[in-house]
Image (cartoon, rainbow, N blue to C red):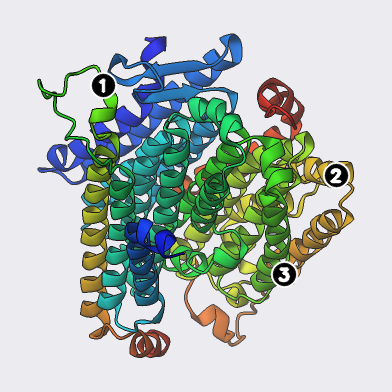
Amino acid sequence: MIQNSPALVPLLLLAAAISIPVLAIKKTSVAYLVAAAASFCSVTISAYNMFHVWKSGPLTYHFGGWIPPIGIEYVLDSLSAFVALVVNVVAFIVLCHAGGLKGREIPGKSVPYYSLVLLFLCGANGIIMTGDLFNLYVFLEIFALAGYGLIGIGEKQAPVAAFRYLIMGTVGASFYLLGLGFLYIVTGSLNMADVRNILPLVQGNPAIAAALSLMVIGMGIKMAIFPLHGWLPDAYTYAPSTTSALVAPIGTKVAAYVIIRLLFFVFDVKFVSHTLPITDLIGWLAAIGILFGSVMAMAQNEMKRMLAYSSVAQIGYIGLGIGMANPLGYIGAVLHILNHAFMKGALFLVAANLRKNAGHSDISKLDASYRKKLPWSMAAFTLAALSMIGLPPTAGFFSKWYLALGAIDKGNWVFLGVILLSSLLNAVYFFRILEKVYLAPPPVQGPGEALSPKEKKGPIAEEEYSLMIPAVVLSFSLLLLGLWNANIVKGIIQRIIPLGM
Amino acid sequence: MIDFFLGHYAYWGIITLLIIGLYGMIFKKNLAKKLIGMTIFQVAIIMFYVASAVKWSATVPVLDPLAGAADAAKYISPLQHCLMLTAIVVGVATSGVAFSLVIAIYRRYKTLDESILLERMKSS
């Protein structure tokens, strides 16, 4: 069982995705059940994998019994097992929430929708676990194509946003493929571990530099690192709520994981930070992106759009950690993949609850009545917002703490300043909402008093447990993640600090 | 100098195709033309891989009794072609998704021209 388990998650998700249209032929509600069950199984298996990797070291799986440099290999080490577990857990909680929405935003399309969700997760798991660079490209495209579909199902403007994402995403994947072509011509191998062994022998070849730059630019588009983020805000805003809550925590993180894997585990740390200082470039672009995303988020009135710009900023933190290329920055980046997945998931779920119960997610329309009608959703929002700002003991504080330590360690005071300044900016755009909901006086309503225009818009529906619980679970787990962060860092992330950092 | 250009003529052709593709995607206003640019871009990369597999005075990677099995230098590397079969399939799938999105856009906005589309998106 255990030697087959790395391949199990992507194959299970793929099989379930294909079988959904058949199983749901009579009754469309079956689609959701199959998707939730498959997602639950993938959580269980990846938790088991994580436990096994934690206890007895990396796992590998060779497809078709072919030995690695020739065959395709799946590798589960501390990093990939950890990211896979994070992705699957967040996806499962978001799918639980989707059950509460009952396909409200995707009328009549739930069968293809849940099939695409599983394909999306299959792609994400494949990207994370594969040890083969070309296999990564194939899963990247499965992941991206499912993502375009998931976004395009949304509002009226959604196909336009999805089309823009498709053009940019395809260019990104094509750049990756082109870079991989260079790398393959020079090294003659596609296996990550094998390429890593061959690369020192061909270090002086200029094609290596071209390969690395093209692959990093390609993945940078997918990751939405600062000047390449153009597709992100529209795509997240117009997508259905479930898609936003699924793509925002998972989509960009997976690309960030690929960049970490490429720079530090395929290429050499010294090569990417000294010979061809691409990590510096990523770091500085990320620093600009953090400030840009935070300032743009302050200017938005739509909550989903604000969260989308805030994603651009938060992706910047991961880029900043990659850019430092030292152990503390690396820990910060990987920890932030985990924390941001939970925070953004929780925030987008609250935005979904607002849209469901109040019919909008417009920040200017929020007032004190929301804390009465949606107490748990707003509590979840508050906790996730505090974590985004980085208040201890929430999880967000600790990843920023490691990033700040990394910046000090590197002696880069600009990065430190950016981290501190962006925390303030985060506070500005989140407290704007918290102030409206919690600090404004509750609407007093005498018997003869005329209703203000806000109240005339109709009452806000009461919270439903099925919608409230997933958001609350995600955001309260931020407290637990914050308290356990030392265990996570020591037990999982520190085990696989890239060589030479 | 001339050798440099003639010796790499395949790569010059591929670079031209890549630039045409990028030009189409960035500067063409019509969404369908953008897609054509995207396809050209993808095809250029496929040609790049295929060009990298070219080997003079070698044969297709099928066992030839005359050439013998032992000498790998007499056969073209089949791997690039196999990879590109996958990439072609991926490209077809991408075009399929892209065209379905284009159809969805046309049904909702009755135009494929980007500037008119942006205006109609704002007004709606």
Q: Residues within 10 Å of mark 2 (few under 14, many from 20)?
A: some
Q: Is residue A41 visible?
A: no
Q: Nearer the viewer, residue A51 or A443?
A: A51
**Three-letter amino acid code of the residue under disc 2:** Lys
> In the rendered view, would you say A153 is above or below B103?
above
Q: Are marks 1 and 2 on the same chain?
A: no
Residue A15, position as x, y percentages in the image: 24, 32
Which chain's residue wears label 2? A
Q: Nearer the viewer, residue A269 or A418?
A: A269
Q: Quadrant of the N terminus of chain A?
A: top left
Residue identified by numbered label 2: A410
Residue A442, position as x, y percentages in the image: 70, 70
Left or right, A453 with reference to B26? right
Label 2 or label 3, whichever comes before in sequence order: 2
- Secondary element at image label 2: helix
**Three-letter amino acid code of the residue under disc 1:** Asp
The Cα–Cα distance between marks 1 and 2, rounded to whole angstroms, is 52 Å
- Secondary element at image label 3: helix
The Cα–Cα distance between marks 1 and 3, rounded to whole angstroms, is 72 Å
Residue identified by numbered label 3: A432
Q: Residue at x 69, y 49 (%)?
A: A279
Left or right, A231 with reference to B46? right
